[in-house]
Image (cartoon, rainbow, N blue to C red):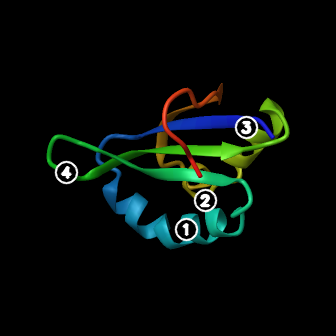
Amino acid sequence: MPLFVAVCIDKPNSLELRMATREAHFAYVRGKQGMMKLGGPFLDENGQMAGSLIIFEAEDLQAAKAFSAEDPYTKAGLFERVEVRPWKATFGSLD
């Protein structure tokens, strides 16, 4: 299955919303274990979470965008912007 990357940038001053939605986000991605390859937060200059990077498998770009749209973080309005793109690993391994 092809790989995709979601680059999600939080709205300014939204750490409280991120923390309030974090467990729902974790439950959502845990339920997608077959899809998930790697994920974690971007950090700002103070070391606080300020966005997300997720690498995952999906059938196609439409399915990848649907996965991102259903994320509780997205539904809560946490992100200022989200970009979902096809991705190809060139160096290293996700195994």
Write down the residue under mark 3. Answer: 65
Write down the residue under mark 4. Answer: 47
Q: Closer to the observer: label 2 or label 4?
A: 4
The structure residue drawn at horizontal position 63% and vertical position 28%, both measured from the top left corner, is: 87
**Which quadrant holds residue 5?**
top right
Q: Of marks 3 and 1, which one's residue comes earlier in the chain?
A: 1
Of the residues shown, which amino acid type is indicated by label 3?
A: Lys
Q: Closer to the observer: label 3 or label 2?
A: 3
The structure residue drawn at horizontal position 32% and vertical position 56%, both measured from the top left corner, is: 15
Of the residues shown, which amino acid type is indicated by label 2?
A: Pro
Give the class, few, some or many, for how many residues have Cα within 10 Å of label 1's Cα (few <14, many ≥20).
some
Secondary structure beneath label 2? helix
Q: Of marks 3 and 2, which one's residue comes earlier in the chain?
A: 3
Image-based side of 33 in relation to 16, left or right? right
Give the camera-side residue of 8 and 85.
Answer: 85
Write down the residue under mark 1. Answer: 26
